[in-house]
Image (spheres, coloured by chain):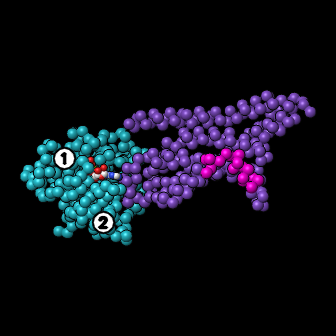
Chain colours: A cyan, B purple
Amino acid sequence: MSAVVKLHDIHKSFGAIEVLKGVSFEIDRGEVVAIIGRSGSGKSTALRCINRLETIQSGTLEVCGHRLDQPTLDLRALRQDVGMVFQSYNLFPHLTVEQNITLAPRRVKRLPNSQARALAQESLERVGLAEKIDCYPEQLSGGQQQRVAIARSLAMQPKVMLFDEVTSALDPQLTGEVLRVMETLAQGGMTMAVVTHEMTFARRVADRVIFMHQGRVWETGPGEMLENPQTPELQAFLSNGL
Amino acid sequence: MGGSFTVNHFLYLLQGVGWTVVLSALAFALGGVAGFGVMLLRTARSALLRRISFLYVQLIQGTPLLILLFVVYFGLGVVGIELPPLLAAGVSLMVYCSAFLGEIWRGCVESVPRTQWEASEGLALTRWQTLVDVILPQAARIATPPTVGFLVQVLKSTSLASVVGFVELTRAAQVVNNSLFTPFLVFGIAGVLYFALCYPLSRWSRSLERKLNVGRRQAA
Ligand SMILES: Nc1ncnc2c1ncn2[C@@H]1O[C@H](COP(=O)(O)OP(=O)(O)OP(=O)(O)O)[C@@H](O)[C@H]1O
Ligand SMILES: [Mg+2]
């Protein structure tokens, strides 16, 4: 097994405030890693560093063979390899579902227009929404919008998927449908980093859990670590959260 | 001297209306292109470009249009560049429009949430692709009412071009009045003609705004 995401001693500050204070972890090919932790512990920032939405101050960071700490980085090649799904879906409101999904493949990968619809159809089937292909985002429920956002990412055939609290804006019943899609992806062998507050999902689906605290990886282990926390901080986090 | 207002006088004023429209269209077309450039610079990644374009906008917005006209018409004349009045007025108004339109459009581009940029960049779209395919279509919706509103301002501002001898509606009215000495009648008619040009635009701008608001409410 080779790691496709490698963070080593990552430091990241916003102005004078250091948000990541030496974060190191790796994600192997096909592995699903859940990142948990209190609000403000740096989970989103760590995730956003992986596809260069944030730049790091120091440390080494390699993703799918791209060295993010080198000036020679090919940013667009990196982003073709890494898909990201956000808490607020961030679909393009002026485009239909089909156009949302096929915009990047058409522009970035020069997908011919004649094949675009088939790609959209195929991606939507993976999230169980084939019948919504001609809808606009505002015509969909939150859960459906989030599944479209996942399909949009999948259409670029990424090697790694990043999920940042993708169910936090959803009602409990809509949360389930999105989590099921993610679970299917995980079973299909996708390499995933999932920032989440869904402890059940973390325990059941993730191969490994990373607990972040105050800008550091505080504790890490398999899903069972949530039943048997080693640090008082994780203990406190779990008892407050559940 | 004197005499009464005839059909010929009216036709002369209508000709002035024609030139007012031509000048407005010229100013708006050229100013729109330049304004797009200003908007790009104002939202550029380079802080230097943002700074330079900011100074440009401040400078133009802080200068009366009349002064711009004098600079272009008389100033360029002194250094040997003789522009015909239409072109001089067109260039001045272009500069004037570019600063205001650039700033209006910058605001519209920046009102599109940052997360739309992030989602696009995360999908490996370039900055330009993101702008063209994702940001501008959303910004354009917001931009249309204020842009049309500004067009009304430009249309009225073209009356200043009369000072460099361009015979648009205001200048035409002056000419007619100089022979008839019936200022209330002649300038009254000119005013009505300006109103007839501007009112439909204002109405259009307001109906666009209403439609936009309705769209917003449905989307929410
Ligand atoms: N763009 C930014 N500018 C300044 N500070 C920021 C920025 N983004 C995040 N921060 C700060 O960095 C810290 C970590 O933020 P981050 O979003 O990574 O936390 P998080 O673990 O994802 O929290 P949450 O669970 O609330 O999403 C917070 O204190 C936050 O205020
Ligand atoms: Mg976060």
Parent chain of label 2: A
Parent chain of label 1: A
SS type, badge 2: strand
Q: Is residue B145 above or below residue A60?
A: above
Please identify, in this view, whether the residue under mark 2 or under mark 1 is nearer the observer. Answer: 2
- Check if mark 2 and mark 1 are on a common chain: yes
- At x 77% / y 32%, what residue is drawn? B187
Q: Residue furthest left?
A: A228
How would you rate the neighbour count of disc 1 (Cα within 10 Å): few for under 14, some for 14-19, many for 20 or more? some
Query: What type is the residue that disc 2 sits on?
Result: Ser
Q: Please say whether residue B70 is one of the residues in the magenta stretch.
A: yes
**Quick one: A190 or B114, which is closer to the camera?**
B114
Tell me, yes or no, whether the two marked residues, 2 and 1, touch with CB atoms within 8 Å: no
Instruction: Please indicate, yes or no, whether residue A33 appears anywhere in the rendered image.
Output: no
Q: Which residue is mark 2?
A: A58
Q: Is mark 1 within 8 Å of ligand 1?
A: no
- At x 35% / y 56%, what residue is drawn? A15
Residue B93: x and y in percent read 67, 48
SS type, badge 1: loop
Where, quadrant-wise, is the N terminus of chain B in this rendering? top right
Q: Quadrant of residue B19?
A: top right
- At x 25% / y 45%, what residue is drawn? A167
Residue B181: x and y in percent read 85, 31
Residue B199: x and y in percent read 64, 33
Q: Which residue is mark 1?
A: A198
Instruction: Please indicate, yes or no, whether residue A212 appears anywhere in the rendered image.
Output: yes
Query: What type is the residue that disc 1 sits on?
Result: Glu
Magenta stretch in the rendered image: B59-75
- At x 30% / y 65%, what residue is drawn? A58
Q: Quadrant of residue A17?
A: bottom left
**Quick one: B63 or A166, which is closer to the camera?**
B63
Q: Please say whether residue B114 is one of the residues in the magenta stretch.
A: no
